[in-house]
Image (spheres, rainbow, N blue to C red):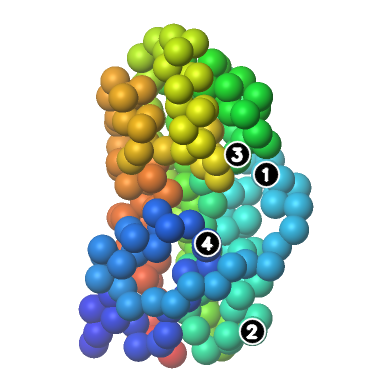
Amino acid sequence: MNEWFDPGRPVILASRSPRRRELLARMGVAFETAEPDLHDEDAYIRPAELARSLQELAAAKARSVSAGRPAALVLGTDTVVTVDGAVFGKPAGDADARRMLRILSGRGHSVLTAVALVCEEAGFHASECAETRVFFRKLSDGDIDRYIASGEYRDKAGAYGIQEGAMVFAERIEGCYFNVVGLPVGATIRCFQQFVAKGRT
């Protein structure tokens, strides 16, 4: 039987994120990429059922690609930041990013990333949601202004990338670091293992 990273079918990452592409490649998976065709992603998010709704969104992204490539294994993902019941996705612009970072300053927050692995031809679906706690030091206005000016916040949940300049914001991390970057390694492996365990039918 093949290892989890060689499931016997083409693998497609349904994401345009360069960070996710890099992580999946580092995990040893050979894959293609395709951008999911999904609109109004925010409509999927239910704060009261955040983990479940994130998994549903990741699966919807995967299925939007799987519809055109039914024989492939498609990996969908989505990441959000949450603090005190508020859910932060990607900021709308500088002002929104500044608002998010001010709220995150000097406190802990959760980063949740859902992964969903789908193969339409095999009738297969597996999904998980990982959570990591991140604790920011108190940020000055200058810290925030410099980071906003760098443009690194764009297209990142919670308006920061822990693997880039925002590494200096974090005092400690509890849980999977790669989850904060955008692809939880353990959860992703378990989804592939489920497929391989079913005999790659």
Question: Would you say the residues marked 1 and 3 are in contact, meaning their CB atoms lie under 8 Å apart?
Answer: yes
Q: Which residue is mark 1?
A: 45
Where residue 54 appears, x then y in whole percent? 58, 49
Q: CA distance from mark 3 to mark 4?
A: 16 Å
Where residue 36 appears, x then y in whole percent? 62, 67
Of residues 107 and 48, the one drawn nearer to the viewer in this rendering: 107
**Residue at x 36% of width, y 14% of height:** 137
Q: Which residue is mark 3?
A: 89
Determine if residue 106 is in view. no
Mark in the foreground, 3 or 4: 4
**Nearer the N terminus, badge 3 or badge 4?**
4
Q: Amino acid at mark 1?
A: Ile
Q: Amino acid at mark 3?
A: Gly
Where residue 98 appears, x then y in whole percent? 58, 22
Mark 3 burial class by Cα count in 10 Å: few <14, some 14-19, many 20+: some
Q: CA distance from mark 2 to mark 1?
A: 25 Å
* Position of the C terminus by quadrant: bottom left
Q: Which residue is mark 2?
A: 68
* SS at badge 1: loop
Mark in the foreground, 2 or 1: 2
Give the side of residue 34 with respect to residue 190, left or right.
Answer: right
